[in-house]
Image (spheres, grey):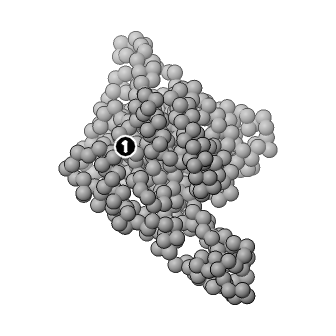
């Protein structure tokens, strides 16, 4: 039996090999990321692995795909469900993006702590909201629905194997090989001709809409390695002559703990595609759609920590409103804001309940009086040396950063009629499309923290639950 964990790890490897063949610059990105990671590990030693072992970081990837309809989204959920990947979080890029990005998204990933440690592969998956009149009028929605309804992204045999794998927890060797082959092929770049006029019509609305609804299949939009020093990687990629987007998205580079997620990418490359003209001719041309993204993951924040991040982001926008600044100047202003408001140590993050940590008994009572009884509150346990804290890695995404990456790689801003009402399509609607629960990332992090506190309580023989700060 090849279980869901093994299927996920194998699929991530195959997808990476396939994408490296289709987008050779991705291989360069992976090579540079691993080079930077080796340098950081040599420089920092064990501290470099505080947010995950080097083996996990080296193997870690997140992919991104885009689909057009609720039916396609539901099928994606079945394929990823076979690999122990479940929908986590809701992202409305219609609102997060300044340009025309008419999609809502979720991320399929493992949710269990042990599964994340084994292989944290995640896929950021976006779906068109064709009923949103800010982007699509009635006629275009109808024609788009007909186009999308006529295509088949996933063969029935793949879905059959996916359902069996999810129900049984895996597949036998032969079925696993068939599943992996079909799943990888489903995300390859199509060689079928693209209708030039149809693609162009959608592109006038949104480059993202054209990439989803203007082609006969889906594909991997980007595949993202994880790096321990994203600023060093950005510089080294530029030195190799690869054009990067203008800035690193997310929190600034500063002197405190890494929080949340920082992302950047090289710009979308011109890839050869086959087009069908209105007169029936088939010609070769290119499209700039796919890009190479890289990420540096920090500590997961609590709702209070996220509120602080959002507040500081708004203050940064206000401080720079109307000014043209470089990425370095923007980072400097942001870092100054952070240094005045964000705790500069992990201990302060714990004390302020601003970030998630797991807690572990030390095995001795350094700092505690011999024969003393451990306190029942977390602050006391930490202060007296009964317990240590380890940060929980942020496994999810920031909608504004995702929108920023999308926008930086668009061929045009598209069009958005702000005089029309948008379509309601929230987290509950997306969960209904998926036919399975949409996990709240905060609840997942909190449950991991709570489980660690229960273990600490049991190991120290405490009668009551340990009180958080």
x then y, percent, for residue 281:
40, 11
Residue name at image x 70 percent, y 48 percent: 5
Residue name at image x 58 percent, y 78 percent: 383
Q: Is residue 360 left or right of residue 340?
A: right
x then y, percent, for residue 269:
43, 27
Of the pair 122 and 86, the residue shown nearer to us:
122
Residue name at image x 60 percent, y 76 percent: 382
Q: Residues within 10 Å of mark 1 (few under 14, many from 20)?
A: some
Task: Give the structural element (helix, strand or loop) at label 1.
Answer: loop
Q: Is residue 464 left or right of residue 445?
A: right
Of the pair 337 and 301, the residue shown nearer to us:
337
x then y, percent, for residue 163:
67, 45
Q: Quadrant of residue 367?
A: bottom right
Q: Quadrant of the N terminus?
A: top right
Q: Quadrant of residue 212?
A: top left
Residue 41's place in the image compared with 242, above or below, is below
Give the labeled residue for mark 1.
247
Task: Using the rendered image of the protein, determine whether residue 467 is visible from the camera's viewpoint.
Answer: yes
């Amino acid at each position: 039996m090849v279980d869901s964990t093994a299927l996920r790890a194998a699929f991530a490897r195959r997808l990476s090999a396939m994408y490296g063949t289709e987008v050779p610059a991705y291989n360069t990105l992976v090579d540079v990321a691993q080079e930077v990671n080796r340098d950081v590990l040599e420089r920092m030693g064990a501290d470099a692995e505080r947010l995950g072992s080097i083996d996990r970081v080296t193997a870690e990837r997140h992919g991104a795909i885009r689909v057009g309809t609720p039916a396609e989204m539901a099928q994606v959920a079945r394929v990823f469900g076979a690999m122990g990947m479940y929908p986590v979080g809701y992202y409305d890029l219609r609102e997060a993006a300044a340009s025309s990005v008419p999609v809502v998204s979720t991320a399929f990933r493992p949710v269990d702590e042990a599964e994340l440690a084994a292989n944290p592969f995640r896929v950021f998956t976006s779906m068109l909201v064709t009923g949103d009149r800010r982007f699509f009028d009635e006629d275009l929605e109808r024609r788009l629905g007909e186009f999308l309804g006529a295509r088949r992204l996933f063969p029935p045999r793949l879905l059959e194997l996916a359902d069996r794998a999810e129900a049984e927890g895996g597949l036998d060797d032969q079925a696993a090989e068939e599943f992996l082959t079909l799943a990888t092929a489903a995300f390859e770049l199509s060689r079928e001709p693209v209708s030039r006029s149809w693609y162009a019509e959608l592109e006038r609305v949104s480059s993202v809409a054209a990439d989803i609804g203007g082609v006969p299949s889906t594909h991997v939009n980007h595949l993202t390695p994880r790096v321990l020093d994203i600023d060093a990687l950005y510089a080294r990629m530029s030195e190799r002559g690869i054009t990067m987007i203008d800035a690193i998205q997310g929190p600034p580079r500063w002197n405190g703990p890494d929080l949340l997620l920082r992302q950047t990418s090289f710009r979308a490359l011109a890839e050869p595609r086959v087009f069908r003209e209105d007169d029936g001719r088939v010609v070769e041309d290119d499209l700039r759609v796919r890009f190479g993204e890289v990420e540096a993951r920090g500590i997961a924040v609590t709702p209070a920590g996220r509120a602080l991040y959002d507040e500081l982001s708004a203050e940064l926008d206000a401080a720079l409103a109307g000014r043209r600044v470089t990425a370095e100047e923007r980072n400097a202003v942001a870092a100054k804001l952070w240094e005045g408001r964000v705790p500069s140590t992990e201990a302060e993050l714990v004390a302020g309940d601003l970030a998630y940590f797991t807690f572990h008994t030390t095995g001795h009572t350094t700092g505690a009086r011999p024969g003393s009884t451990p306190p029942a509150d977390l602050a006391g346990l930490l202060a007296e040396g009964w317990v240590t804290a380890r940060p929980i890695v942020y496994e999810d995404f920031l909608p504004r950063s995702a929108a920023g990456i999308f926008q930086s790689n668009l061929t045009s801003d598209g069009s958005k009629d702000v005089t029309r009402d948008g379509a309601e399509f929230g987290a509950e609607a997306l969960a209904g499309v998926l036919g399975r629960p949409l996990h709240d990332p905060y609840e997942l992090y909190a449950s991991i923290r709570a489980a660690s506190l229960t273990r600490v309580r049991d190991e120290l023989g405490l009668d009551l639950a340990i009180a958080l700060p």
